[in-house]
Amino acid sequence: MKVHFASILAAALVCCILYTPASAQSNQHGDVAALQATILHRDSRFWRAYNTCNADSMTLFFVDDLEFYHDKGGPTLGLQKFGETTRTGLCGNTANWQLRREAVPGTVKFFPMYNSGTLYGAILQGEHVFYVQEAGKKEYMDGHARFSHLWLNKDGVWKMARVLSYDHKPAVYTAKTKIIPVSPAKLRRLNGNYNSSKAGTITVQQEGNALKITTSSFQVMAFPETTTKFFLRNRDLQFEFVEENKQIARVIIYERGGKVEEAPRMQ
């Protein structure tokens, strides 16, 4: 097989560019640790501004030629455009609606970036979840996404230059409520059909230490947090049974902290 000298030379040059001797790497550990602490601190300050919808403070953490790529909202190019979009969109109606972001523990990673052995930037990447805060309602977790942020030093200040926001999807809800034991007899008192204006007939049936709740479009298992209030493990949905004259009269349905409806028991 004929090997071209030019190909060998090119490969050697690439190796020289990409390879950093171990001794040089060990000398850079102190710089990397300091940079990681700086960027994580600035990252926490940015998200504090985000969670309070302080748009003016948020813009301080980006370069002027910002490139922001979102897998649902498309690209936003330039800091001026980003500021305008933030003020009118994300932070345009904070009296009634606002987002709060939390990083998913254990997912945030830091990667230093070098140019011929010189530390010039870093990538911060990970996963985060978003909570919706609506006026008059309990905060609820709504979305999950991944992020990759390229940080660069601009005039002595570390700022985000390129932002990738992607893999947006509904957040997986896990109830933190504890299940309590309830006697089968107390659970059977709740059995019956309930007339829902939204879902039609709701059928409730005791099954073990839980209630099987069925409509024409879904079937779920609800678990007791009290003898009359039940919750789903994987959805922010609760059912509260109300007694009148020593009989179960209706069920109140709650979702995401808000009351959905009351469904009277059918005779």
Image: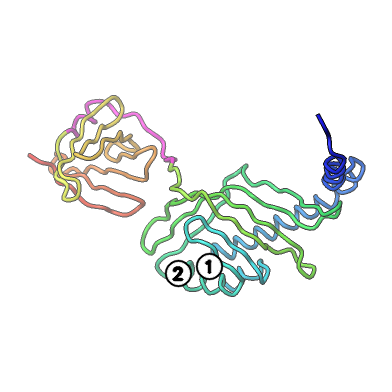
Give the mark, 2 or 1, whose residue is nearer the N terminus: 1
Figure quadrant of the C terminus: top left
Q: Which residue is mark 2?
A: 94
Outermost residue toward the left in this view: 267
Q: Which element is circle 1 on?
A: loop
Taking 106 as reference, is 72 above or below it?
below
Q: Residue at x 44, y 40 (%)?
A: 174
Asked whether 190 or 11 is in front, the reply is 11
Q: Which residue is mark 1?
A: 53
- Cα–Cα span, label 2 and label 1: 8 Å
The foreground one among 135 and 224 is 135
Please name the predominant secondary structure of the magenta segment in the image. loop
Residue pictured at 14% horizontal, 38% vertical:
193
Q: Quadrant of the N terminus?
A: top right
Q: Which residues are magenta?
A: 174-191
Contact between labelled residues 1 and 2, with CB atoms less than 8 Å apart? yes
User: Percent from the top left, x then y, of residue 189?
Assistant: 18, 32
Q: Is residue 186 magenta?
A: yes
x and y, in percent, of residue 128 in the image: 55, 50
